[in-house]
Amino acid sequence: MVDTKFKQMDNSDLEKFYLKQLVNNVPEFLFWKDKNSVFLGCNKNFSVMAGLADSSEIVGKTDYDLPWSKEESDSYRADDLEVMRSGQGKYNIEESQTTKTGELFTLLTNKIPLYDQNGDISGVIGIYTDITKLKNTQIKLEQEKIRAEAANRAKTEFLANISHDVKTPMTGVVSVADLMMHTSGWCTPDKAAIIHSSGLQVLNFFNSCLELSKLEITEWSSAEEVFSLKTLFEEIYALFLPRAISKGLQFTIEYDTTLPLTLFGHRGSAYRVVLNLVGNALKFTETGSVQLRAFLAESINEKSLRVGIEIKDTGVGIPEDKQQIIFEKLCRLTPSYQGKIEGSGIGLYIVDQYVKYMDGSINVESTVGKGSSFTVLLPMTSASTPSLPENTAKKVFTETNPFSHATPPITAPANFSDSSTDETTLAADAPRILLVEDSDLIQVVTKMLLHEAGFRVDVASSGEEALEMFSAGKYGLIYMDIGLPVMSGYETAHAIRAKEKTEHASRLTPIIALTGHGAVDVQTFCGQAGMQGVLSKPLTREQVENVWKRYGEGESIDIAGLTLIASPSPSSIHSQIIDVDATVTLLGTEQKARDLFAVFAKELTEQCLPNIEKSIQHHNREALGKQLHAMLGTLCYVKVPLLHQAVVDLQFAAQSDFHTIETAYQQLQKEAENFMDLYQKMKNEGEI
């Protein structure tokens, strides 16, 4: 039976009825406007979003009459005008919208022209979807991706640090042992001290790794016990005093008289915390003092209290934006292969974990160039009453302290003297070599090795010093450590080549890079800087002799462990903008290649290029380096040869000479534009 009300409708009214039902029940947001962006109507969903009681209330209003912000309304009006002016639809517009209650939504909008009966454009029709949940999920995924990439970078850098921190001391062991095997009368206390010191460095490194694995693989267990914090302080003081004396630092400890003589708490964990923090303070302080202090931070009740432990130094300091990330696992402010300060990025992470396990807290205050102060607060229980005499409340130890007779750790014998380093024993025409190396230990053993092989050796501890010492034709060969502080080995080699050009050198001095780590792009950077080869530390007698035969005497000879470097030339650079075949071959299917190209094109325009531009504008080398490193990782899979080369060139400019970065950046922009143009064309033609 047909409903009576439908019988009373003519076909036109019935059509309008069904159309209204359809529009109001579509699970999207619909609206239509005239040429002036005045609303002509909307569906129920849209009226609810706009805070209206009924969809009819929208008629005659504009976006500026609705809850959204002026900026949002301006954007909507601009889209309307573009659609009406072009006569073309505008699709997948991602935009925001603020509701009457102040909630912020993310919309995906499509707009098309609205035509009148004569076929003329009379307004716009719009439909949008609420993608707020999807967007929030996407943001979370991107944040997870960023965290995963950061963790991956930390692991990569940790592996590079492992390579450096193990190879550097082992260079001392292997090199000195090599000399002992080939030279009679070489087993002396000085050489034994080098081996002993080097072995300790390796042992300390692996102890840190072992402690980290224990923390992460097993549950923390630390029995509480009665102990003297004052005694614990004095044990750590005695342990580190030789290092303080060797560096000429004032090392002091102070124990608050209001603290009990004995406490009940996690002595073992507290010891590890103080040990690591004091060790770090001494490591990063070259002049001034390190202070260790215990104080009563809070009396909770008659027995319970909060003990404060402060470690204060006058060292290098920590930048404000880095003061929280230093407690992250494997975090180092500078990789060990880029400076003189060793480390694995484990110590402060371990400290933070121990403090958390003890329900304590840790805070850092620091100023670059002035020093740092770490304050740890730990809950403990009093096991006695305060009874320290006032005159023993504070101890200040200097070199006159009874402990001052202790022998400091040996890194390189200061009084080393041996016929192997006496140039008077060398032939009059012995070749002269420049060794650029910042490690005292590596300087000593490498110089010994080179002398034993018959070379005169000048040693530069920094890139700046090497540049001052160098002049065209002065040296037959240069061994260049690439991980120099301040002015890297790449920068130094680049500057040497510029100096040779200025001095009109008749021949380029061969430069062999020495590396103790596995960082990426070493060969590329060495080639860009004008070096001839890369050798991994430690050098051997055979390598030293063969390197000279090849570069000093011109013999065609293969050298074990030497990676030959050829400076890139335009002819060697791949001329393709997009290499689809190589990408498909790598990924396995055309669809995977197509998807990855789409993701890369989006990231390139929305993230990579804006981030690079921002980093350059703010002269932020670190941020620029991270972005370029991430791009190179992607470009290992997306084969875009010319853009890849432009990224490498910009990365090298950032590493070596920030003044030339603008030219490299312009080239990167050009190649990025070429890629996007070709990508869009190939996409439209179905080729990708």
Image: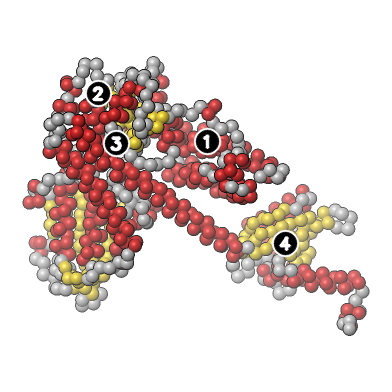
Q: Which residue is mark 2?
A: 455
Residue 8 lies, with reference to residue 528, above or below; the image says below
Cα separation between marks 2 and 3: 17 Å
Q: Image point 21% across, 37% down: which residue?
A: 177
Q: Is residue 343 visible?
A: yes
For marks 1 and 2 on the same chain, the one whose residue lies earlier in the sequence:
2
For marks 2 and 3 on the same chain, the one whose residue lies earlier in the sequence:
2
SS under mark 2: loop
SS under mark 3: loop
Q: Quadrant of residue 115?
A: bottom right
* In this rendering, the label closer to the viewer, 4 or 3: 3
For marks 4 and 3 on the same chain, the one whose residue lies earlier in the sequence:
4
Give the percent coordinates (x, y) of residue 359. 30, 69
Q: Which residue is mark 1?
A: 645
Q: Is residue 464 visible?
A: no
Q: Are marks 1 and 2 in contact (CB under 8 Å)?
A: no
